[in-house]
Amino acid sequence: LALLGDLNRAIKDNELRLYCQPKVDIPSGSVCGAEALVRWIHPRHGMISTTEFIQLAEQAGTITPLTNWMLEAAFSQCHAWHEAGLERALAVNLSAHDLYDQGLVDRVRGMFSTWGVGPELIQFELTEGTLMADPDIALATLFNLKNLDVQLFIDDYGTGYSSLSYLRALPVDALKIDRSFVTPMTAKDNSAVIVNSTIELGHNLDLKIVAEGVESQDVWEQLAAAGCDVAQGFLISRPMPADEFLAWDAGWR
Ligand code: G
Ligand code: G
Ligand code: NA
Ligand code: MN
């Protein structure tokens, strides 16, 4: 596919951008970190859909260069914030294929020493389905990442399959409840029941709970009442260019 061939060129030509979407600690209302999200600004086609090119790269098995680009961008950003006196965790998304990359853990370890960033400042979000192809290799990667003292999140929790078996098998610290359950929480369907039960289940397993897709104050209030730990969504902020984050953070509340 043309788009895919173009992605490697785009990495070389510096067309990828780091965007950050804030995460807020619900009880205190303070910013606790951000999710790192890639954007591709093509010189002719403009902004390319992230979902589209990530999916293409995943299907073609060529996500590694993009993941490496993102890791460099995230470490560099965390370092810059640290220099500016801001300690904020950045969460990097990992795809299934990344966990079969035997070089990943060594590269991440190298970046920690190169950038002098503490392990509490880099986190990883794992999409369900991540372990399917070869659970042994993927699990080994996760345990080795965990040995670097980073926090691991299960992303889009509640969608896909085998979520309950993941909770038993994976060395994870937190669940991100999928936004398809969170956004409609105030509607009269079963979303709130599912979210509230997931919060309780997660807490009983000593996991932190992040709700993504928080778009309204009503949803925020319901999450707070249910004891949810962290919120992310358009109510707080849309993803923004990383170099705008410092000013946004300073202006929050
Ligand atoms: O931010 P946006 O809604 O455009 O993201 C679309 C999808 O792309 C989301 O599922 C998100 O997790 C994924 N995504 C964004 N950045 C990255 C990245 O750097 N690596 C991977 N693997 N996925 C990403
Ligand atoms: O798959 P993942 O959860 O990583 O997807 C993250 C993407 O979800 C972000 O790129 C962002 O564009 C999108 N997103 C974040 N907050 C909200 C929200 O409140 N509502 C909606 N509809 N999408 C959101
Ligand atoms: Na994510
Ligand atoms: Mn998600």
Image (tube, rainbow, N blue to C red):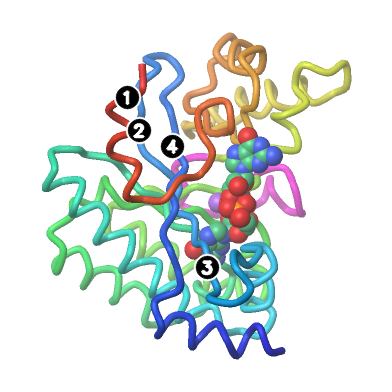
Mark 3: amino acid: Ile
Residue 158 on the magenta segment: yes
Q: Position of residue 214 (x, y in %)?
A: 62, 28
Q: Residue at x 47, y 42 (%)?
A: 21
Check contact, mark 4 vs mark 2: CB within 8 A: yes
Q: Residue at x 60, y 90 (%)?
A: 5
Q: Which residue is mark 3?
A: 41
Q: Residues within 10 Å of mark 1 (few under 14, many from 20)?
A: few
SS for dot 3: strand
Q: Which residue is mark 4?
A: 22
Quadrant placement of the C terminus: top left
- Quarter residue 173 falls in: top left
SS for dot 4: strand
Query: From the viewer's perspective, is residue 22 above or below residue 139?
Result: above
- Say the numbered circle drawn on residue 248: 2
Check contact, mark 2 vs mark 1: CB within 8 A: yes
Quadrant placement of the N terminus: bottom right
Of labels 1 and 3, earlier in sequence is 3
Single out the residue that lies furthest toward the front.
44
**Residue 128 at least partly seen:** yes
Distance, label 3 to label 4, CA atoms, is 21 Å
